[in-house]
Amino acid sequence: MNGKQRIASAMRHEEPDRVPVMCQLALGHYFLNTRFAPHEIWFTSEAFAEALVELQRRYRFDGILINIPGRPQGLLDEAKSIRETDEGEELTWVNGDVTLIPWDDNAQHYHADGSRARRADFDTLDPEHLDSIDDLAGYVWNTYHVPWVTNKPDRGPMTEIPDYFFHTFDLVKGMVGEEVSIHGEVFSPFTHYLELFGYEEALMGLIKDSGKAHALLGRLAQASITWGVAQTKHDADAVLISSAFAGGGFVSPKMYREFVVPYERKVAEAIKAAGGTVYTHTCGHLGDRLEAMLETGTMGIDTLDPPPLGNTTLEEAKSLIGDKVFLKGNMNGVEVLAFQTEQEVIEHASERIRVGMPGSGYILSTACSVPPKVEPWKLELLAPLAEEIGQY
């Protein structure tokens, strides 16, 4: 079996030749461990695509997650200067805005006066008139990951996909063909909502005016559906709903069912109706909402952060929901970062294979993104280990 076949089989709870291996890598891990500069990876489809494939081949992962959309051609032509600092690369744009890309972390965007990108005001934003969000650098930056919306065919929540969004996908596909499982990613409606206002104001809005929050979530769901369905129709092998902030550290199980489930269900149903496979990435404490997550119609659960990062053991998840959805993750990324020996990594991963393997439906992975400074030799151990002890 190749990686594409192996992951597809595990997702269907069929028995592949062995347990698949596929970790999501933090962007900072690509910055530190490929030949490309951070600004090239962040702002060009070509460098990001090559970085994705370079590390997939090095680690022999069965799949690749393309977790930021493609970039417009010539975007860096709008950069007036690019200089290296102790903190990272600093790009100054022709309009005076500045982007700082730390050497090992996601890019940060600032206005020319040094202020952070402006976000929406919950009290004054009208859910029926969201054209203005394209003028809010806070929303644009956190949704499109570029300083401004470029060639966007509509205003407000995305209803059409710019062609350049597919650039990275097409380049990766051209390099790996049908050998590797290629996954796309969309923000959940709840994540869009949080990024629109900033986390504190958005969470307070759930309490101050729940009706308005629901109206906003309903509108914002359109962008998630549009991009998720588009990737499915573009032959993505699966689409990940990134719902990082829906765990126990942000909302209670009751609020999760009220403000997250209905809108993620819309996204999942749309992707499945288009013939796609959909799964969900939520960080932190999930142990009290695993069954509620299934109410979204998702086909798989990603991360499963173990204690102390979260509160989910793989045994619990496997017993409770493992016959209903596939599971991916549960390796503690912080522990992996701290490990000093090959034996420590092997023992940690071996336990996940032992628990997750029976009945199929498990993909070996770190719980969340691989931390930027995890040494590559640790990840190079995983595929050979799966071949040794993870064969069906």
Image (tube, rainbow, N blue to C red):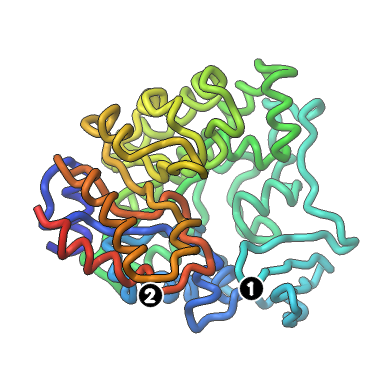
Q: Is residue 250 above or below residue 104?
A: above
Q: Nearer the viewer, mark 2 or mark 1?
A: 2
Q: Measured from the top left, where is residue 152 in percent x and y?
A: 60, 53
Q: Measured from the top left, where is residue 258 in percent x and y?
A: 53, 18
User: Quick one: 327 or 96, which is closer to the camera?
Assistant: 327
Tag shown at residue 103: 1
Amino acid tagged 2 = Trp
Residue at x 90%, y 61% (from the top left corner): 113
Amino acid tagged 1 = Trp
User: Quick one: 317 or 231, which is closer to the camera?
Assistant: 317
Residue at x 30%, y 42% (from the top left corner): 327
Q: Residue furthest right?
A: 113
**Could you tell me if residue 39 is visible in this image?**
yes
Q: Please give the count of numbered marks on the rendered protein.
A: 2
What residue does disc 2 label? 377
Between the C-alphas of marks 2 and 1, the distance is 20 Å
User: Quick one: 24 or 221, which is closer to the camera?
Assistant: 24
Looking at the rendered structure, the secondary structure element under dot 2 is helix
Q: Measured from the top left, where is residue 238 in percent x and y?
A: 32, 48
Neighbours of disc 2 within 10 Å: few (<14), some (14-19), many (20+)? few
Report which quarter residue 2 is drawn in: bottom left
Q: Measured from the top left, where is residue 119 in percent x and y?
A: 77, 43
Q: Is residue 327 above or below residue 334?
A: above
